[in-house]
Image: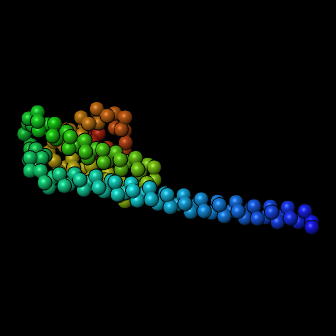
């Protein structure tokens, strides 16, 4: 028996095993990335759904959001907490987009939603600016540009 031939065959088999392992790991990694992207998209969408559910089901909240006159302390707190929900979702969308976890179209929709909500609710921008002041570490995120603008 030629030990050199046996060693060469063993090296070839070992190299094949390494290649098969790398292919398997690449496939598993791809599956994991797909799963992470799907979870991030689902999380952002569920966040928006939850806010919309609040608006639909809570008449008091709707009245507060539509109010154009001075808010009572209770209404101001309710409004601020509503804005916190939105800002948290938007920040999550920004972070997920920056990390490649959500598609660009979902991010663009969330970014456009910032201006939609400013235009939709009379005192939204004021409350959102307060949120950005309280959480300056997230205030530089691109998604919050419409809130940082001095207009309206």
Indicate the position of residue 75 as horizontal and vertical percent values. Answer: 11, 38
Q: Residue at x 64, y 60 (%)?
A: 22
Indicate the position of residue 124 as horizontal and vertical percent values. Answer: 19, 43
Query: Position of 33 compared to 143: left or right?
Result: right
Q: Is residue 151 visible?
A: no
Q: Residue at x 12, y 47 (%)?
A: 61
Q: Quadrant of residue 91?
A: top left
Q: How many discs mark residues in the rendered view?
A: 0
**Residue 14 vs residue 49, the one in the foreground:** 14
**Residue 128 vs residue 17, the one in the foreground:** 17
Indicate the position of residue 85 as horizontal and vertical percent values. Answer: 25, 45
**Residue 151 vs residue 138, the one in the foreground:** 138
Q: Residue at x 92, y 67 (%)?
A: 1
Q: Quadrant of residue 21?
A: bottom right
The colour scheme is rainbow
| Residue farthest toward the front in the current orientation of the protein | 1
Q: Residue at x 8, y 35 (%)?
A: 72
**Residue 127 vs residue 51, the one in the foreground:** 51
Query: Position of 57 compared to 37: left or right?
Result: left
**Location of the C terminus (image quadrant):** top left
Q: Is residue 18 visible?
A: yes
Indicate the position of residue 95 as horizontal and vertical percent values. Answer: 40, 46
Q: Quadrant of residue 10?
A: bottom right
| Residue farthest toward the bottom in the current orientation of the protein | 1
């Amino acid at each position: 028996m030629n030990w050199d031939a046996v060693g060469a065959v063993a090296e070839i088999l070992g190299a094949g095993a390494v290649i098969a392992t790398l292919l398997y790991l690449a496939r598993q990694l791809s599956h994991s990335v797909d799963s992470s992207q799907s979870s991030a998209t689902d999380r952002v969408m569920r966040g928006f759904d939850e806010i919309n559910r609040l608006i639909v089901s809570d008449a008091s909240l709707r009245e507060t959001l539509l109010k154009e006159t001075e808010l009572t302390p209770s209404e101001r707190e309710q409004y601020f907490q509503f804005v916190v929900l939105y800002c948290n979702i938007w920040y999550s969308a920004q972070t997920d987009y920056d990390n490649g976890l959500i598609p660009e179209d979902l991010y663009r929709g969330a970014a456009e939603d910032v201006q939609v909500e400013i235009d939709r609710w009379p005192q939204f921008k004021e409350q959102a600016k307060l949120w950005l002041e309280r959480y300056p570490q997230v205030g530089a995120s691109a998604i919050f540009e419409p809130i940082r603008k001095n207009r309206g």
